[in-house]
Amino acid sequence: MMLLRTTVSIRLWSNSLASSPSFITSTTSPTVAATPFKTKSHSPLVAFPNYRSTLASPRCTVSDSDSLKFQEMAAEDAQDHRLAKIASAIRVIPDFPKPGIMFQDITTLLLDTQAFKDTIDLFVERYKDKEISVVAGIEARGFIFGPPIALAIGAKFVPMRKPNKLPGKVISEEYSLEYGTDTMEMHVGAVEAGERALIIDDLIATGGTLGAAIRLLERVGVKVVECACVIALPELKGRERLGDNPLFVLVNAPGA
């Protein structure tokens, strides 16, 4: 009797496995997937799904303050497989906030926990050994990426805000817009002369806000090590407004 029950149980279990569905995860996206890259280990190419992104082929880019040339990083280091995932997670919304604007929406990147983590990790890996004591985040999306980077590298986070947003005594820097001017503010005493700072924002367009942040920090004796952004819009030539200050960007928007 025990043998019969065992045999029946085995047959039922076997039949159950045979009839159960297989779960296959497809990497095919209904829209264009980000261009994959080879890693140092020459692993197989991988295609990542996206959120209808139209970002160009992702790559890390750096502006070199010594040669004053904007160039890609060393090929092997630049082709990090994580960049494809980051690029494909950024959604592009046309005609927002006004007609003709292709808005780079990083909220979809924040929904993808792995892509968000990869974004922070790439910045942390770059800056963890550069003796940075200040991470200055530009309002508002610099507040998203700045704090986790600051915590990971052991630096303090300093918010750079629009006028009348900070409650204490502030130091201000005015900068030009296409039509008119705007102002950036920072709390007095938030940084000290001789400190080394990283300035972080989600995107560089015309470079006006990054330039103002650089001048604001330099006025109080802080050394700006580098500016860092997730996305660049190269056609707007924002890099040129940064002078000799280096810029590190993860991915370029369309047209790069």
Image (cartoon, rainbow, N blue to C red):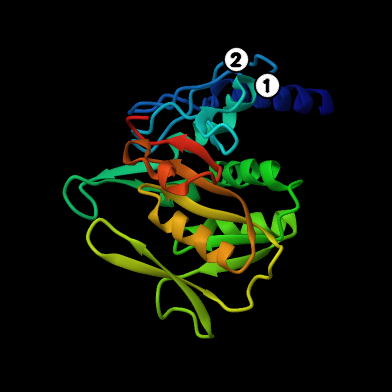
Q: Residue furthest right?
A: 2
Task: Tell which tag, 1 or 2, sits nearer the viewer.
Answer: 2
Precedes in sequence: disc 1 or disc 2 = 1
Question: Is residue 62 visible in this depiction of the protein?
Answer: yes
Residue 85 x, y percent position in the rendering: 51, 34
| Picture quarter with the N terminus | top right
Question: Is residue 111 visible in this depiction of the protein?
Answer: no
Residue 213 horizontal side relative to residue 181, left or right: right
Task: Identify the amino acid type marked 1.
Answer: Arg
Task: Identify the amino acid type marked 2.
Answer: Pro
Give the residue at x 68% y 70%: 192
Determine which residue is flagged by label 1.
11
**Toward the viewer: 211 or 228?**
211
Give the residue at x 37% y 47%: 205
Determine which residue is flagged by label 2.
44
Rounded to the nearest angstrom, the CA distance separating label 1 from label 2 is: 40 Å
Q: Residue furthest left?
A: 99
Residue 203 horizontal side relative to residue 37, left or right: left
